[in-house]
Image (cartoon, helix red, strand yellow):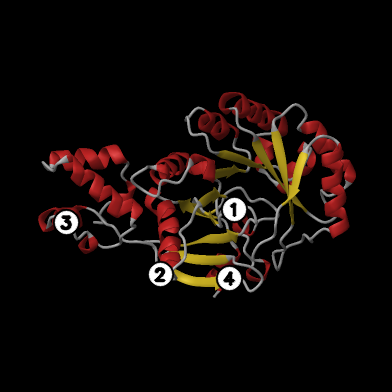
Amino acid sequence: MNKPHVRNLPWDELDKIMKELGEPAFRSRQLFQWIHQKGITSWEEMTDLPKKLRMWFAEHFSIEGLPVIRRLASRQDDTVKYLLRLPDGELVETVLMSYDPPEGKQRRTLCVSTQVGCPLKCAFCATGQSGFTRNLEVHEILGQVLAVNRDLVSAGQAPVSNLVFMGMGEPFLNYENLVQGIRLLHHPLGLNISWRRICVSTSGIVPGIYRLADEGMPLVLAVSLHAPNDELRSRLMPVNRRYPLEELVAACHYWVQRTNRRITFEYILLGGVNDSLAHAGELVGLLKGLLANVNLIPFNPVSDGPFVKPSRNKVMAFRQYLEDHGVTAVIREEKGGDIEAACGQLRRREMRG
């Protein structure tokens, strides 16, 4: 019988176990730090805990990490893609992006996956083309961050500073594990990652937006929009048939009202599909009165996909139209183009052999 993974336990459950074992309060803090801050993968590494306590946990809980199967480093920039193996043999991707802003400290952002594959079948997404297998457990979400941190620290580099839940899968279709994972990553005895350095991206699962707005976690919410009308969005993103734009925009207004936080819309520009000035005009109308900004993302081609990258002139004209009509828009810096950094592409190649 497989043992439960200790990183699946929230703080209060771990603390309760320690109290039932008769351990003093400081032991709970020590154990939590070993598990979540130092990210150990063996009970023997907990050198300041009594051997009897370590043996008890080894008997009742697993603490294994996620081994790195492949590591691809971009020659264009500092992007690194990791392919990790889960305990059941499934594969998951995570992508590290490093930024060196001229005005401040280097930022290391990790794009985290929440599912093996994805059930939403967005037309332009490599992950969706591979189908859906299962949700990730809490420890598998955390394990991506810890595996990358181990790699960074071993190279004498600073650990991950920012998290974006934009990897494989739809985060809100694994809601409970997502939220518990985020709370553990934010915990002051763990990695202590600030709320404002955590972004959750959704393809438009409306109930998830309402639920997250009420969680009391002032993080960043991003919505993958990619089309300004229902007809086009339903073709590109079948989820729109279940949650059309009117419902999605209403949920976004609720988010802003409840959290007083700006919302980010992700808009992949697909050459000849959604990149005209007419589309830009529709987008301006859709976002009217909403505290929001738009990230414009020139499409990163999937090798065997039907879509193409838009011209630079089209991208610039689209952005200028939004800005001229009062919508804050930025062209998101492309990272890792030479290693196909969009999540799902490396896993598909590995599965094909």
Sooner in the amino-acid sequence: mark 4 or mark 2:
2
Residue 165 placement (x, y as % from top left): 54, 48
What amino acid does circle 4 point to?
A: Arg
The residue identified by callout 4 is 349
Q: Determine whether, in the image, residue 2 is placed left or right of residue 109.
A: left
Q: Earlier in the sequence, mark 2 or mark 1?
A: 1
Q: What secondary structure is found at the residue carrying circle 4?
A: helix
Q: Label 3 belongs to which residue?
A: 54
Please give the label number shown on residue 154: 2
Q: Which is more N-terminal, label 4 or label 1?
A: 1
Nearer mark to the viewer, of 2 and 1: 1
Residue 352 position in % (x across, y down): 56, 72
Label 2 residue SS:
helix
Labels 3, 4: front one: 3
Question: SS at mark 1?
Answer: loop
Looking at the rendered image, the disc whose residue lies closer to the viewer, 1 or 4, is 1
Residue in the image at 62% along x and 63% along y: 341
Q: Which mark is residue 104?
A: 1
Q: How crowded is mark 1: few (under 14 residues within 10 Å), some or many (20 or more)?
A: few
The residue sitting at 83% across, 36% down in the picture is 282
Q: Which amino acid does label 3 sit on?
A: Arg
Is 51 placed above or below 24 here? Answer: below
Q: How many marks?
A: 4
Query: Tag 4 or tag 3, which sits nearer the N-term?
Result: 3
Tell me where residue 201 sits by quadrant: top right
Q: What secondary structure is found at the residue carrying circle 3?
A: helix
Front position among marks 1 and 3 = 1
Q: Taking 345 as reference, is 245 above or below it? A: above
Query: In the depicted view, which residue is nearer to us: 112 or 330?
Result: 330
